[in-house]
Image: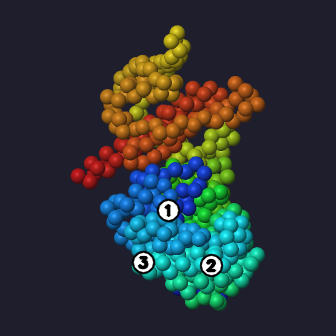
Amino acid sequence: MTEREALTLRPGPHLPESIEIFDTTLRDGTQREGLSLSLHDKFRIARKLDELGVHYIEGGWPGANPKDDEFFRTASQELQLETSQLVAFGSTRRAGKSPEDDPVLANLLQANTRYVCIVGKAWDYHVTEALRTTLDEGLKMVADSVRYLREQGKSVFLDAEHFFDGWKYNRSYALEVLTVAEEAGVECLVLCDTNGGTLPFEVAHIVDDVRSRTTVRIGVHFHNDADCAVANALIAVQYGAEHVQGCINGIGERTGNVNLSSIIPSLAIKLGVKCLDPDQLAKITSVSHAIAEIANITLDSQKPYVGASAFAHKAGLHASALVRRPDAYEHVNPGLVGNSTRMLISELAGSATVVMKAEEMGIDLHGDKHLAKEILDEVKRLEHLGYQFEAADGSFELLVRGATGWQQKFFELESFRLIMEKRQDGQTMTEATVKVLSGGDRHIATAEGNGPVNALDNALRQCIEQHYPELGDLHLTDYKVRVLDAAKATEAVTRVLIDTTDGLTEWSTIGVSENIIEASWRALTDSIVVGLLRAQKRNESATKAQ
């Protein structure tokens, strides 16, 4: 490959050399609708964030609820953080109270963290209407709280709430909030776009204005209500921000916070700003998926950098180009963020996609373009009938192997029969009888199940388990049905997808038929064949290694 040079564009007038990453998944992120983390969940997420290497982990708001109280009370025993600093969150003192008598500040001190982050109003509208106090008292609330916490030995971050809106409506007051905090000893001034409606060009102007007026480190905290949070954070960094707050996977209230899973790679790879070490950056995909799992959130497969589809290619033109130049259709090397290139098989694919996908399975088709073309034609024919191979890697593997002459000899169906019985007590029972040839013998088994697929699975396993004990490791994890032509009502074609695991790998198989039982049987038997094939290959490899 010849060296290519791109036109170098200057990223910004005040781009810093390094950025602090402040994660607020355990506090701001939990304000997402439908999300509830247990105490155990919070500790698991904190460990993952420490593994990733973020600089600060905001653990919650001590005093706000018993869970957060217990989190900070037990954090020193439960967490042995290696790279991250734990932060307690709270607010400034209340109007009319002294810092020494304020319960919120007392709770912050009892949290026993070196770092605290307090929220203070930076929009005059909120001071007079939400706090119902004077602007002068609003400034004193910020200054007194920062000064008191500093006197108690804490490093203080100020979240200047609604700062961008405050700057636009009353610039002098918003800036004065920052000034009194700086004079009181604040360590970082965090400019918050609390309503999430600020646009990038506004961010550039406002952050530049703040930077010219302070010597304290500037941070930013963006919400995504205008779908600009990541863009806003990037432009803020280019204009001098050195501290970015956000959440893994962009979770948070309303439309979420700035997505750290996107902003971190963009800062490190695109702008060359130090925020995580390269080996830590390579963990961001696995950490992103792990935190989504702990939070019981389905991660969008199209999430930039970390999504399963972030580097997935379906078009044949893309695949053929990637064969020659890996960077032709990928803006970064997927390995830098712990992700990988995936080739999707579909009716939009080309022969190059088939060759590359087969290579992933250990099948070399490079020297047989005619066979690759035949496989592609078969894929297109089947997808026209309703198959979807990009979602059924297991069935595609069997199709490719079949095209090369391979035949599965684990079992051969003679027949199956299903009986469903509705009993007087209201219970519904399904019974399946399966007859197969396996191991040179004819086997017949009858089994019950909580549905036709479960009954067929049980009966088939009884027939062949004596020959293939590996069946005990195979477990169906999901079963999906889709009606492809609802207009045909009960005569519509049905697509069945089955997900299976052997504890080491996972695969999906597909069946399509006007008969839902037949479609289910095809997907079911494919899932078992793939599992037995993989077990067979592992056994062969182990034998060779001995």
Query: Of all residues shown, which one is farthest toward the top?
Result: 424
Query: What label does residue 61 carry, if any?
Result: 1
Q: Position of residue 122 (x, y in %)?
A: 66, 74
Residue displayed at 50% across by 33% down? 524
Cα–Cα gap, marks 1 and 3: 18 Å
Asked if residue 131 shows in the view, the reply is yes
Residue displayed at 60% across by 28% down? 516
Residue displayed at 40% across by 62% down? 72
Question: What crowding class fits label 1: few (fewer than 14 Cα within 10 Å), some (14-19), or many (20 or more)?
Answer: many
Cα–Cα gap, marks 2 and 3: 20 Å
Going from the N terminus, do you reach mark 2 or mark 1 first? 1
Q: Amino acid at mark 2?
A: Leu
Q: Amino acid at mark 3?
A: Gln
In terms of depth relative to the viewer, which is nearer, 83 or 131?
Answer: 131
Q: Position of residue 455 (x, y in %)?
A: 47, 24
- Above or below residue 507? Residue 320 is below
- Above or below residue 292? Residue 454 is above
* Placement of the N terminus among the 4 image quadrants: bottom right
Cα–Cα gap, marks 2 and 1: 22 Å
Q: SS for tag 2?
A: helix
Q: Quadrant of residue 178?
A: bottom right
Going from the N terminus, do you reach mark 2 or mark 3 first? 2
In terms of depth relative to the viewer, which is nearer, 56 or 271?
Answer: 56
Q: Which residue is mark 2?
A: 139
- Above or below residue 275? Residue 531 is above
Q: Quadrant of residue 192?
A: bottom right
Question: What crowding class fits label 2: few (fewer than 14 Cα within 10 Å), some (14-19), or many (20 or more)?
Answer: many
In terms of depth relative to the viewer, which is nearer, 477 or 33?
Answer: 33
Query: What label does residue 152 carry, if any?
Result: 3
Residue displayed at 38% across by 45% down? 503
Q: Amino acid at mark 1?
A: Trp
